[in-house]
Image: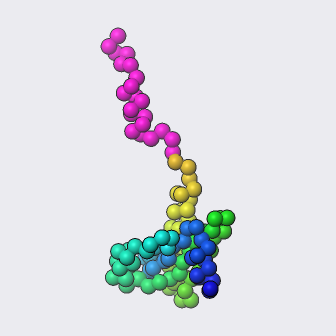
């Protein structure tokens, strides 16, 4: 098993990166790969640049194709991937707006008294 396969199989969260010229798409590699995402990326002329992953222990991993264009795309993709991880780790916000409005309308109307 090479380093790229090891990263994919040992990561809890893993994405493949397809891109070119600073544009990219992150393709989730956990579970079934969405053919529509890859077909759209290939139609745009994107090529495989590498993969990004994070293990259960929180260890990040990156494998990049050996080309300058792939490296530049992977730097940008790593930022987007880090944002996805941060969004998953962030606890849900309390006090949903709809929940607050429901509680507001349950309060007695003091104007009627």
Count of numbered marks: 0
91 w.r.t. 21: above or below: above
Residue 43 in percent (x, y) is at 33, 82
Q: Residue at x 39, y 25 (%)?
A: 106
Does the magenta portion include 98? yes
Nearer the observer, 10 or 88 = 10
Q: Quadrant of the N terminus?
A: bottom right
Residue at image point 49% right, 73% down = 29
The image shows residue 44, relative to residue 97, as above or below, that is: below
Q: How is the image coloured?
A: rainbow
Read off the magenta span: 93-113
Residue occupying the far top of the picture: 113
Q: Residue at x 50, y 82 (%)?
A: 49
Q: Quadrant of residue 24?
A: bottom left
Judge whether residue 41 is colored magenta. no
Of the 4 image quadrants, the one containing the C terminus is top left
Residue 12, how many percent across, how many down?
A: 58, 67
For residue 62, say whether it is visible.
no
User: Can you give x and y, in whole percent of width and height, for residue 92 in the image?
Assistant: 52, 48
User: What predominant SS class does the magenta segment belong to?
Assistant: helix
State the residue lying farthest toward the bottom.
Answer: 66
Quarter holding residue 5:
bottom right
Work out whether residue 66 or residue 40 is closer to the camera in this orientation and state it. Answer: 40
> Vertical placement of 81 versus 35: above or below?
above
**Residue 85, can we see it?**
yes
> Image height check: is 43 above or below 103?
below
């Amino acid at each position: 098993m090479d380093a790229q396969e090891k990263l994919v199989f040992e990561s809890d969260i893993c994405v493949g990166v397809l891109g070119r010229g600073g544009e990219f798409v992150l393709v989730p590699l956990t579970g079934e790969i969405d053919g529509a995402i890859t077909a759209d990326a290939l139609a745009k002329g994107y090529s495989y640049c590498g993969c990004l992953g994070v293990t259960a222990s929180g260890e990040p991993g990156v494998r990049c194709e050996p080309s300058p264009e792939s490296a530049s795309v992977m730097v940008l993709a790593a930022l987007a991937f880090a944002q996805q991880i941060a969004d998953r780790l962030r606890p849900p916000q309390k006090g949903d707006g709809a929940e607050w409005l429901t509680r507001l309308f349950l309060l007695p109307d003091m104007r009627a008294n």
